[in-house]
């Protein structure tokens, strides 16, 4: 004997457990109360009691749960898109739903760190130090030769490195400068005594000499080295470095440099594990129904009705017509499904457009337009003329 499945009787019954497919909001008292009233409203909007509604309480409850979830999904998707640049690197363990996300420079700076690495002004790749042992009268050196190359991290010839800076410069001019602040000779000492500075130690003695004279002398030393002597320089091509001038036994023994390991730069996993990295692991959870405002709840009710209408259309579509004596009753399955799909698409589009107008960018543009309009109004106010 076929079992007769009861349809909508006009009253929704909330049991409290397993009333919805996923049970996401069953513990929320506000959700339970709204489920009953929304089911009654949807049934009446679909024609009850003038016509039978081939749905049960659970059908309306399932549609209501899906509507709340869809609303939360749209809001969370918007928040992720609007806040992701500010959330990179944050912990994934906390629930961000209902939380205020403040703007910060963390994400932008992290994106710029790669440029900082190449520019030598910071970054997220470690700079190491190394040196090449020089030999007299040898100008060219192989940087893969571990017998003459010393690296802070890695082994020459085994680990690929990239040299960022080489410390091979002429001694600073100030090192060969006769210190004008150290008075020497009888005349200098007599001048110091006349100013009452004779009891000062040489390192803190003072003489009346303009600063530009020091600068001119430094430039003279540097120009002399640059024009009349072999300039300190180097040429780095592939793994070979060429030193200028040709080293001699008494000049220097090592050339130091800074480098990075290519494997460090190529490693894409520079951040901490368990941190927000992309759209998929931003910790926005299902929203709490009782925290949704009246505007959102009205959207949810409309979306629930569209889902119930679609569900009813599929049920009635099982039979296109029902035979009765001397006639047929044609069901409105196609009309219900078409109207439901149009309503669902319209509600989703409306919600997305509303959310887009509330993005940070839109708010800033609106604030700028408001400021410009206010400034234009202020400029049209006539200025008062005061006569003394």
Image (cartoon, grey):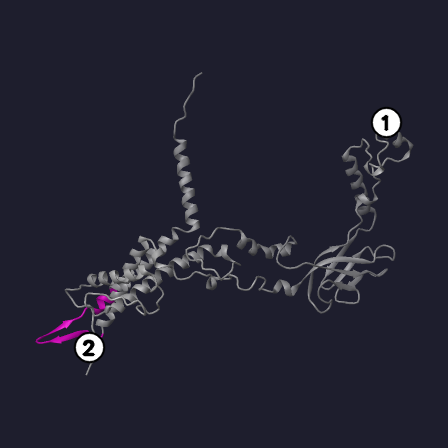
Residue 270 location in percent, x, y?
59, 62
In this picture, residue 354 sits left or right of residue 55: right
Residue 142 location in percent, x, y?
77, 65
Residue at the spot 46% in from the left edge and 64% down from the top edge: 280
Q: Is residue 328 magenta?
A: yes
In this picture, residue 177 sits left or right of residue 123: right
For the residue carrying disc 2, how many other residues have a C-alpha within 10 Å: few (<14), some (14-19), or many (20+)? few
Question: Of marks 2 and 1, which one's residue comes earlier in the chain?
Answer: 2
Q: Is residue 370 magenta?
A: no
The quarter of the rendered structure image containing the C terminus is: top left
Label 2: state its secondary structure. loop
Give 212 or 16, whichever is nearer the viewer: 16
- Looking at the image, which residue sits at the far top? 388
Q: Quadrant of residue 284?
A: bottom left
- Looking at the image, which residue sits at the far bottom? 1
How many marks do you count on the picture?
2
In this picture, residue 251 sits left or right of residue 14: right
Residue at the spot 73% in from the left edge and 68% down from the top edge: 157
Q: In the picture shown, does residue 238 fall above or below 171?
A: below
Q: In the picture shown, does residue 100 fall above or below 148?
A: above
Q: Quadrant of residue 19?
A: bottom left
Q: Nearer the viewer, mark 2 or mark 1?
A: 2
Which segment did they paint magenta?
A: 318-338
Residue at the spot 79% in from the left edge and 62% down from the top edge: 140
Residue of label 2: 4
Residue of label 1: 194
Q: CA distance from mark 2 to mark 1?
A: 123 Å
Residue 299 location in percent, x, y?
30, 57
Circles 2, 1 touching at the beta carbon (< 8 Å): no
């Amino acid at each position: 004997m076929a079992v007769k499945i009861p349809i909508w009787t006009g009253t929704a019954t909330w049991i409290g457990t397993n009333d919805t497919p996923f049970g996401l909001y069953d513990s929320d008292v506000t959700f339970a109360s709204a489920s009953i009233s929304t089911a009654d409203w949807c049934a009446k909007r679909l024609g009850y009691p003038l016509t039978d509604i081939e749905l049960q309480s659970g059908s309306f409850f399932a549609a209501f749960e899906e509507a709340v979830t869809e609303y939360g999904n749209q809001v969370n998707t918007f928040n992720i898109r609007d806040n992701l640049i500010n959330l990179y690197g944050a912990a994934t363990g906390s629930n961000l739903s209902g939380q205020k996300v403040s703007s910060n420079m963390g994400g932008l700076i992290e994106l710029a760190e790669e440029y900082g690495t190449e520019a030598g002004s910071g970054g997220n790749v470690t700079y190491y130090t190394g040196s090449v042992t020089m030999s007299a009268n040898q100008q060219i050196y192989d940087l893969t030769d571990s017998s003459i190359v010393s690296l802070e991290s890695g082994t020459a010839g085994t680990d690929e490195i990239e040299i960022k800076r080489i410390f091979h410069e002429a001694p600073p001019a100030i090192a060969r400068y006769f210190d004008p602040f150290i008075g020497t000779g009888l005349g200098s000492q007599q001048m110091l005594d006349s100013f009452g500075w004779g009891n000062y130690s040489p390192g803190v003695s003072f003489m009346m000499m303009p600063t530009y004279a020091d600068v001119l002398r430094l430039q003279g030393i540097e120009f002399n080295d640059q024009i009349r002597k072999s300039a300190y320089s180097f040429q780095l091509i592939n793994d070979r470095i060429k030193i200028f001038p040709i080293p001699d036994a008494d000049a220097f023994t090592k050339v130091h440099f800074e480098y990075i390991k290519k494997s460090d730069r190529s490693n894409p996993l520079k951040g901490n594990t368990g941190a927000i990295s992309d759209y998929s692991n931003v910790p926005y959870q299902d929203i709490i129904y009782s925290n949704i405002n009246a505007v959102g709840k009205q959207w949810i009710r409309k979306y629930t009705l569209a889902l119930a209408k679609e569900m009813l259309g599929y049920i009635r579509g099982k039979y296109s017509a029902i035979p009765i004596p001397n006639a047929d009753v044609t069901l409105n399955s196609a009309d219900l499904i078409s109207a439901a799909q149009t309503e669902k698409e319209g509600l989703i589009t409306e919600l997305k457009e509303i959310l887009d107008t509330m993005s940070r960018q839109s708010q800033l543009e609106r604030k700028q337009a408001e400021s410009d309009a206010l400034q234009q109004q202020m400029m049209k106010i006539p200025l008062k003329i005061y006569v003394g």
